[in-house]
Image: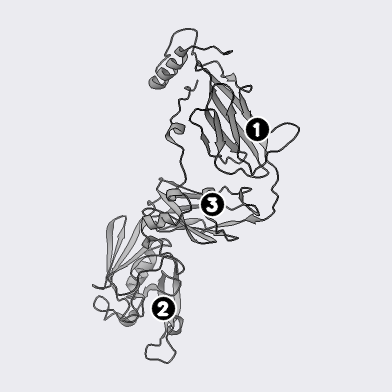
């Protein structure tokens, strides 16, 4: 028997209020018909998380909410730190269950909205605690690079303290590593190996964006013997979009800022046997002075190709020693021939200008070289040389993006705010 009679007219008014916004009262009568608080649905909703006698819920079991009368229209569950629990509602609205793991030793607040057979809204609020984890082993996460302003090509990195090999466990980890940017962009994590992930958008980051990275893994079960640990959040901003394109065939570099050409520089790149890598590289560092030796790239000391030179205005693009730098000894060949051992050389004046106008995370692209393509990982950031579809396959989540609620879960009618 329905103990909370309310006519369908109320629901009709709700729709009208939403449509009209704040333009006036949708229905006549004694005030807004939505001003009455929803009835207490405590006797209609059951949880599997006990709050009696100080008992704590098992964090390794999913949270379940069931309706004994009427139907569930919405469930919001989050812990004291603001981490939301994702879930799935059955088609008949009778059962909701969590699809993401609960954290151990945490306090949760669950808000359930219901609707009875006459469309009257109900509500129940519950708080409960989860128990302490059985294992003390924690997975620590270290984000990179350090906070600051970077170019639009800078990937985000996540270093794990322990290897994670199982795909299902990787999915748990990946869901807990949050990246948000303003403006928003499409992007995803890519597992480089068992202990390292990189995150990049489909395209480069927008210029002057704000990027925030955080972990929501603290206390979350990853495996029987491992739970997530704390991680320091990261905040980055991007500057202008700066891209330097070097054509090894024409021996010229063209530098663009926000899509507009700002300089064209004669250069020399790697000669036969020492060809410069093709593809997109990301500026790793700027070093005013570097002593360059042939032995660092495998050239025997004393051989015809041996060298030991002081180099200025060196902008590093690989960890193995590829730079854009001042090369006053090859000015006669710059713009005409490739005579270097793999670096991009230019006059001291041009190198000083380049050094001043780029920052870490800016992009250096080489085309028409006979060299190999820049490797994706291990020698700097070659992430942008990976096709987007292949990059997404490096994610442990379906489709390379977090699972999203089904349309019927998203499109819910909520009463207008009073």
Whole-percent x and y of residue 271? 31, 80
The residue located at (53%, 61%) in the rendering is 194
Pick the front one: 354 or 132: 132
Pick the front one: 259 or 401: 401
**Element under disc 1:** strand
Q: Which mark is residue 168?
A: 3
Q: Which mark is residue 1?
A: none
Query: Can the viewer see residue 22?
Result: no
The part of the image, by quadrant, that contains residue 62 is: top right
Whole-percent x and y of residue 261? 27, 60
The residue located at (53%, 39%) in the rendering is 86
Image marks 2 and 1: residues in contact by CB distance under 8 Å: no
Whole-percent x and y of residue 116? 53, 19
The part of the image, by quadrant, that contains residue 124 is: top right
Q: CA distance from mark 3 to mark 1?
A: 29 Å
Whole-percent x and y of residue 389? 37, 55
**Element under disc 2:** strand
- Mark 2 neighbour class, 10 Å CA radius: few under 14, some 14 to 19, many 20 or more: some
Q: Is residue 76 left or right of residue 350?
A: right
Q: Which residue is mark 1?
A: 127
Upstream in the sequence, badge 3 or badge 1? 1
Q: Which residue is mark 2?
A: 311
Mark 3 or 2: in front is: 3
């Amino acid at each position: 028997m329905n103990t909370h009679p309310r006519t369908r007219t109320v629901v009709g008014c709700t729709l009208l209020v939403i449509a009209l916004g704040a333009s006036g009262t949708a229905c006549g009568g004694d005030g807004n018909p939505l001003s009455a608080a929803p009835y207490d649905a405590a006797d209609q909703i059951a949880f599997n998380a006990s709050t009696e006698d100080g008992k704590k819920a098992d964090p390794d079991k999913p949270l379940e909410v069931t309706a004994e009368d009427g139907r569930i229209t919405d469930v919001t569950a989050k812990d004291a730190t603001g981490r939301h629990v994702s879930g799935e509602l059955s088609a008949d609205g009778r059962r909701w269950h969590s699809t993401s793991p609960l954290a151990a030793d945490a306090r949760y607040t669950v808000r359930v909205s219901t609707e009875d057979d006459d469309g009257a809204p109900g509500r129940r609020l519950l708080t409960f605690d989860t128990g302490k984890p059985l294992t003390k082993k924690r997975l620590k996460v270290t984000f990179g690079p350090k906070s600051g302003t970077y170019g639009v090509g800078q990937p985000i990195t996540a270093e794990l303290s322990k290897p994670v090999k199982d795909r299902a466990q990787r999915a748990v980890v990946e869901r807990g590593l949050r990246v948000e940017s303003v403006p928003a962009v499409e992007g995803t994590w890519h597992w480089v190996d068992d202990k390292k992930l990189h995150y990049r958008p489909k395209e480069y980051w927008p210029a002057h964006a704000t990027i925030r990275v955080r972990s929501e893994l603290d206390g979350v079960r990853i495996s029987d013997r491992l739970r997530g640990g704390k991680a320091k959040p990261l905040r980055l901003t991007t500057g202008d979009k700066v891209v330097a394109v070097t054509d090894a065939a024409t021996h010229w570099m063209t530098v663009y800022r926000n899509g507009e050409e700002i300089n064209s520089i004669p250069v020399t790149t790697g000669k036969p046997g020492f060809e410069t890598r093709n593809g997109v590289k990301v500026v790793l560092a700027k070093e005013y002075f570097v002593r360059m030796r042939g032995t660092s790239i495998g050239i025997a000391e004393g051989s015809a190709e041996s060298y030991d030179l002081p180099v200025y205005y060196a902008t590093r693009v690989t960890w193995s020693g590829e730079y854009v730098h001042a090369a006053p000894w090859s000015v006669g060949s710059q713009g005409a021939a490739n005579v270097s051992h793999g670096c991009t050389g230019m006059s001291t004046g041009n190198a000083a200008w380049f050094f001043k106008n780029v920052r870490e995370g800016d992009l250096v692209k080489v085309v028409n070289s006979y060299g190999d393509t820049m490797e994706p990982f291990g020698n700097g950031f070659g992430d942008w040389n990976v096709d987007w579809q292949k990059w997404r396959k490096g994610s442990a989540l379906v489709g390379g993006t977090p699972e999203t609620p089904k349309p019927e879960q998203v499109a819910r009618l909520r009463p207008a705010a009073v």
